[in-house]
Image (cartoon, rainbow, N blue to C red):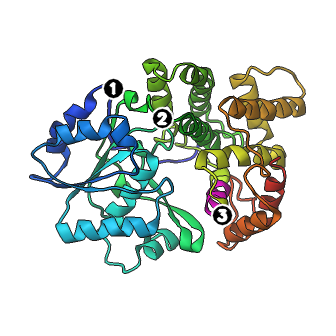
Amino acid sequence: MENFRYQNTTEVVFGKGQTALLPQLLKEYAPANPKILLTYGGGSIKSNGAYDQIKTALAGFDLLEFGGIEPNPQYSTLMKAVDIVKAEGVNFLLAAGGGSTLDGTKFIAAAAKTDSADPWDTILEKQTPVTDAVPLADVITLPATGSETNGFSVISKKEETKKLAFWSKAVFPKFSIIDPSFTFTLPERQTANGIADTFVHVVEQYVTHPQDCPLQDRQAEAILLALVNTAPRVFANPNDYQARANIFWMATQALNGWLNVGTVQCWAIHAIGHELTAQVGVDHGRSLALVLPGMWRQQRKEKGEKIAQLGRRVFGISGDNQDEVIDKTIARTISFFQSLGIHATRQRYGVSDAVISAVAEMIGSRGVKIGDRANIGKQEIIEILNLCD
């Protein structure tokens, strides 16, 4: 096991009706007499009841609103919110919605505290450490990104066809309210995307190379096994509260930092998936389901032992021939994605040879190979995407 430092300061407030606790939580975590900016995306928080519950809970608070944050939050949109924060003296941010809204709000929190004229360049291109941010919290309504208990944020800039990430302790939510009943109205597509995202989050930390971290392995396998077993219940009955609650808690645990302490992580699937989203607009969860089989096929020598371990422990695949187990594991993973309604191939999503070249060039231009062994460069990316059929 590698050396590590671990800290997670977010308080999770989980269950039905917990949005009513907002006044108490703000008293604990926000400045006195806070001026709050409520951020959200489209209309989902108004159809699922979250918006009304938040407004009721915050009656009497000094509250501004900023809507319209995109599913892949755009820099130009977020900078409009930064201007409001600065002009109005906002001192607390409350994100309501899915991971994209929360990711965007984390960027707003960081950008509002920087003197840079171009926060994109400073925070995302140059990765200048973010040491200060406007405090924030969230009412999260979509299980997927795990952004509710971590310091990660992924932002897009369509003018440059880029999608980049940053991490900072300063943007961990002070608290995250998770009410699974808000997910009852999610379209099947969003539910499926979130489950695929959660699955691949675990895989990026688990399917690397053997590192003698049996506890982390078993924790990862527990989430994957529970996810595979619970997902069908959600599609069979979208109003199954217990299934929805369990899926949400799996998504949160998949990326709260527990699985990767003391381990080497991969994140190459995400790196390639982000570029595909920037290039052709494919949903994030679907981009990951697209890239994963090609990644495992191209990296089967390096990742084979862990792929086979996943197959045996999660899918119950037996046999002593590791190559056969690997092939069956890839096939079972694809079948799992298909059971969610995700039939991911590069042809289906318009990933042409030109797009593949553009993705490989964009990642390669950063001068650093990706993957847990730092062995995936331009040529490997091309090979991976050509195996995504």
Question: Is residue 367 depicted above or below 286 in this figure?
Answer: below
| Pair 1/3: label in front | 3
Q: Secondary structure at mark 1?
A: loop
Residue bearing mark 1: 15
Real-space CA distance between mark 2 and mark 3, rounded to the nearest whole angstrom: 26 Å
Of mark 1 and mark 2, the one earlier in the sequence is 1
Q: Nearer the viewer, mark 1 or mark 2?
A: 2
Asked whether residue 278 is drawn in magenta, I would say yes
Whole-percent x and y of residue 311?
75, 28
- Above or below residue 79? Residue 384 is above
Q: Which mark is residue 186?
A: 2
Q: Which type of secondary structure does the marked residue at label 3 adopt? A: helix
Q: Which residues are magenta?
A: 271-279
Q: Is residue 162 above or below residue 346?
A: below
Q: Nearer the viewer, residue 74 or 209?
A: 74
Within 10 Å of the Cα at label 2, are there few (<14), some (14-19), or many (20+) other Cα atoms? some
Give the Cα separation between the discs numbered 1 and 3. Answer: 38 Å
Q: Is residue 5 visible?
A: no
Q: Quadrant of the N terminus?
A: top right
Amino acid carrying label 3: it is Gln
